Amino acid sequence: MTLETTEVLFARYGPRYRWFATVTAMIGTISASITTTTVNVALPDIMGAFGIGQDRVQWLSTGALAAMTVAMLLNAWLIRSFGQRKTFIGALCVFIAALLLAGASPNEQVLIFARIAQGAVAGLLQPLSMYTLFRVFPPAQRGSAMGIFGLSVILGPALGPTFGGILIDHFNWRYIFYVAVPFSAVAILLGSLFMPEREEGGARSDFDWTGLALMSVFLACLLTALSNGQREGWYSSYILTLFGLAALSGGAFLAWELFVPQPLVDLRVLANARFAAAASVAFIFGAGLFGSVYLVPLFVQTVQGFTPLAAGLLLLPAGLMLGALMPIGGYLSDRLPARWLIMGGLVCFALSSYWLGSVDANTPFWMLVWWVVLSRIGLSLIKPSLNVTALRALSTELLGQGAGMINFFRQLGGAFGVNLLSVTLDRRTFFHSNALASVQTAANSATADLLRTLQDLLAQAGAPPELQSAGALHFLGRVVYAQAYTLGFRDSFLVVALVFMLALIPAWIMGTAKGSARA
C-alpha cells in the first residue's frame, strides 16, 4: 500500500492540493487556538463560580501557555516518529476530550488541568501547521504562506472572545469550551484525507524524556514562584526554593541538550545568528502580545463594568482588521526587508499600549476599539515577516526544529508575559492603594466633605447612627481601591509599551545578522 506522502498527494490532487492542505491546517489550528483568549472574557464569571481570586484564575491563561510552550518542543520528534497525519488527528482527539472535561469541570483544579491539556494540543498544532504550509508552498510564496498561517493562529483568539461573550450572556461560561468541538471534528475528517503520512522510513528515534522533564520542572517552578510571590512573600523560603529549583533545572536542561545524542531541542538552530535574533524578537513580542490580550478584557469587565459580550465585541473589529491585513503582511514579507516590517509593527504595538496606559472608567468604547485595532495592524506586519525570516535562515533538515523553536520562544514569552503582568498589576495596585489611603486623613478637606455627605445620605436612607460612619468609611475604601486598581492597569499597559520598544533592538540585529544555509 502506497504511503500518502506529500509527493503522492500532490500527484493525486495536483496544484490544488496546496490549498486542501492549507485549509486543513488552518481549521485545525483555529480549533486549537480559539479558547486561548476566549477564556479571558470568562475570568470574572469563573472567579465568582469557584470563589477564587486573580492569583488563581490567571493560571487558566498561564497554565495553558506554559503547556503550549513545552508541547512545541515535541513537534519535530512527533513528525519524525509518527508523521503529520497521525500527530494532527491524535492531538485533536485529545483536544476534544479536554474541551468536554473543561465544560463539565466541578472545581478550578479540574478546569486548570483541562486548560493545560488544551494548551499542549495548541502547542503541537501551531508548528505542525506552520511546517505543513512551508513544505507545500514554493520558496517564492512562503511569505504569503506564513501570512495565511499567522491568520489561522490569530483568527481564533481574535474572534473567540466575541463568541464567548455571546455564549456567556445567553448560557454560561462553560459553553465557551464546547464551541470548538465541531471545528475539531471537521479538522479530524479533513486531516485523514489531506495531511501527509510519515515520510521517513526505519525505526522511530528515541524521545528525550529527560529533556522534557527538566523543561517542565523549570517552567512549573518558575511560573509558580512568580504567581505566588506576592501572596507568600518574595523572600519566603517557599518562593526562594522554587526559584532555586527553576535555576537548577533550567541549567541542567541546557547542559543535557548539548550532550544527549538525540536532543529534544537541537541547539544548532540558535547558532544561526539570524534565527537567534528572530527568536529574541519572538520572545519579547510574545510577552507583550499575550500580556496585553490578558489585560484588556479584564480591565473593561472589572473597571468599566462591561458584560462578557461587550468585552468580546470590543475585540471583534481588531480581529476583522487582522484577518484582512495578515495575508497582505505575508505578501509584503516576500517583497520588502523583514526588519522594517517587524520594527514598524512593534512601534504600532508600543503606541497602542502607551495610549492604553491612559485608560480610566470613562474611556469611550470606540477609543478602546481604535487602540486595540492599532495593535492588530502591528501584528499583521510582524508575524509573517518574523516566521519567514527565521525559517529562511535554516537548512532543510532543521526546518522542523526551527518551526517548533520560533513558536516555542513566542509562547514562552507569552507565559512569562501573562504571569509577570498579573504580578505587576497586583503590586502596582497595592502601591497605589497605600499611596491613596495615606492621604485620606481628617486634614484632607475633600475626604472630610465626602464622608459627611455619605453619612447624611445614609441617615436619610434610615441607617442607624452607629452604621453611618462605618458605611461611609467602607464606601471610601472601595473608591480608593477602584482608583488604585485603575492606576495599576495603567502602569501595566505602560510596561507592555516598554516591552515592545525593547524588541526593536533584536529586530534591528536580525536584519544585520547573517544566516547560514537557506531552506
Image (spheres, rainbow, N blue to C red):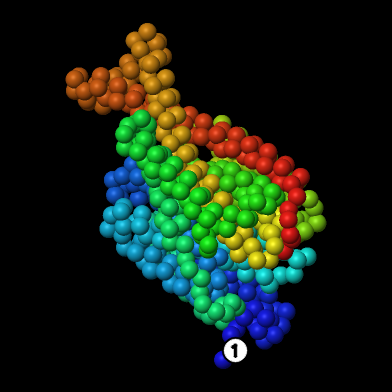
Whether 495 is drawn above or below 316: the answer is above
Picture residue at 63% right of the left edge, 46% below the top: 281
Where is mark 1, residue-wise? 2
- Is residue 186 visible in the rendered image? The answer is no
Residue 64: x %, y % from top left: 44, 54
Farthest top residue in view: 443
Residue 352: x %, y % from top left: 62, 39
Q: Residues within 10 Å of mark 1 (few under 14, many from 20)?
A: few
Residue 94: x %, y % from top left: 42, 69
Picture residue at 55% right of the left edge, 65% below the top: 76
For the N terminus, the image quarter is: bottom right
Along the line of sight, the residue nearer the viewer: 438 or 332: 332
Picture residue at 38% right of the left edge, 68% below the top: 97
Quadrant in which residue 55 is drawn: top left
Along the line of sight, the residue nearer the viewer: 412 or 152: 412
Q: Secondary structure at mark 1?
A: loop
Residue 436: x %, y % from top left: 41, 20
**179 left or right of 46?**
right
Farthest right residue in view: 335
For the C terminus, the image quarter is: bottom right
Farthest bottom residue in view: 1
Whether 75 is drawn above or below 67: the answer is below
- Is residue 173 visible in the rendered image? The answer is yes
Whether 241 is drawn above or below 442: the answer is below
Picture residue at 54% right of the left edge, 57% below the top: 265
**511 left or right of 78?**
right
Along the line of sight, the residue nearer the viewer: 203 or 150: 203
The kind of residue tagged 1 is Thr
